[in-house]
Image: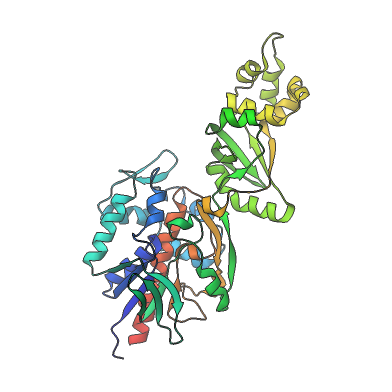
Amino acid sequence: MGMVPNVAIIGAGPAGLMAAEVLLEKGIAVNIFEAKPTIGRKLLMAGKSGLNITHTENFKLFLGRFSAEFDTLENSIKSFTPTMVQQWTSNLGIETFEGSSKRVFPREMKASPLLRKWHARLSKQSLKTHVNYKWLGWKEDGTLLFSCPSGIYEHTSTATILALGGMSWPRLGSDGNWLHLFKKNGIAVREFFPTNCGFHFDWSNVFRDRFAGTPVKSCKVTVGKKTISGDLVITDYGMEGTPIYAHSETLQEQIRVNGYGVISLDLHPPIQLESLIERLSYKRSKISLPNYLRKNGKLSAVKASLLREFLDEDVFRKPKALGRKIKCLVLKTQKSQPIERAISSGGGVKFTEVDDFLMLKAYPGVFVAGEMLDWNAPTGGYLINGCLALGRQAGLGAIKWTRDTFN
């Protein structure tokens, strides 16, 4: 054919780099193009407070955390399981540890050592990295077009892997601009929306000023029929935290359909309602309400103030009614944080558009990976594990495509 097998990867985040890794291992030349001046910007941001790379819970439970019910996603993760992710980091020379919640972190916690070692290893395997190369689309003959510091650059490859990300934290590179190009070319996509994000609640000024930034420890958060336990954080606009993030897609759907989303908070999970009512029934006449809620209800100041924020005064004089509210405080929210502030985004290329190896059915030789696809997962190592697995799957697909093309 006259052309040496080579693959172009557009986007140097976890999915793009993992695709490059599997291709390089098979001796296939790889050029990776990144629109920003440096690679892995969102990965570095994710690692600022500790890089959570995977999760070691029961594997069936692990798979159940991913929202897209498609075999393609599940099979990709089965091919790069949490155990394999840990082995991979170990082979990079990055030691990991498992936290009490079964989350897995690098011993150094940060993302930068992992990214540095990973890119150095890939570069030794002849990866060519091009930064400040913004993808513009294709020419009529399929040639890739980029704008770069020297002008317009054209690149021809045997296969192309697109790992352009979703739309959260656009200043780090994932601006979702490619969505318009895909729609124009008839590829079915779902509009982006924020996920793993905080939600707005109408605090009084007094509550906001006193408690913004305060954790609400050990709650059960129920949305619909699903309950998630964990800690919340009061913010100046509302609430955030792992249990809220895990419900964000359902809350977004409720807001879209009804105009508001509903969460139920159990502020004292360990105690049964009957026992709680019994404790609340013993009230000394001279005890103040804050002390009553602290001693009898075993509620922290922020939990007690949450109740006072939303309940009428007469509820606090009725142990049965108060007990029920402590076990089930219902709050409504009408909007989430904007997508620019979300940890991740939902939406993207529908799985019906790709084959088992993530190749676009309408565009042979073009693969999509990572957050470009329409899937979602909560924080806790699921997102990064998912991106790595999908990048690997696209890389395997490109290997198969190149072999078929050149044989």
Q: Nearer the viewer, residue 259 or 357?
A: 259
Count of numbered tags: 0
x and y percentages locating residue 181 in the rendered image: 53, 74
Looking at this view, name the residue that lies furthest to the right: 314
- Vertical placement of residue 123 versus 1, above or below: above
- Vertical placement of residue 118 versus 208, above or below: below
x and y percentages locating residue 174 in the rendered image: 46, 61
Residue 239 visible, this orientation:
yes
Looking at this view, name the residue that lies furthest to the top: 286
Q: Residue at x 28, y 52 (%)?
A: 90
- Vertical placement of residue 263 versus 174, above or below: above
Q: Residue 5 appears in which quarter of the rendering? A: bottom left
348 with respect to 116 (left or right): right
Q: Quadrant of the C terminus?
A: bottom left
Q: Residue 396 appears in which quarter of the rendering? A: bottom left
Q: Residue at x 43, y 60 (%)?
A: 173
311 with respect to 194 (left or right): right
Colour logic: rainbow
Q: Residue at x 75, y 23 (%)?
A: 313
x and y percentages locating residue 214 in the rendered image: 53, 31
Residue 269 visible, this orientation:
no
Looking at this view, name the residue that lies furthest to the front: 150
Q: Residue at x 66, y 55 (%)?
A: 253
Q: Nearer the viewer, residue 169 or 187?
A: 169
x and y percentages locating residue 204 in the rendered image: 66, 32
Looking at this view, name the residue that lies furthest to the bottom: 1
- Vertical placement of residue 17 versus 83, above or below: below
Q: Quadrant of the N terminus?
A: bottom left
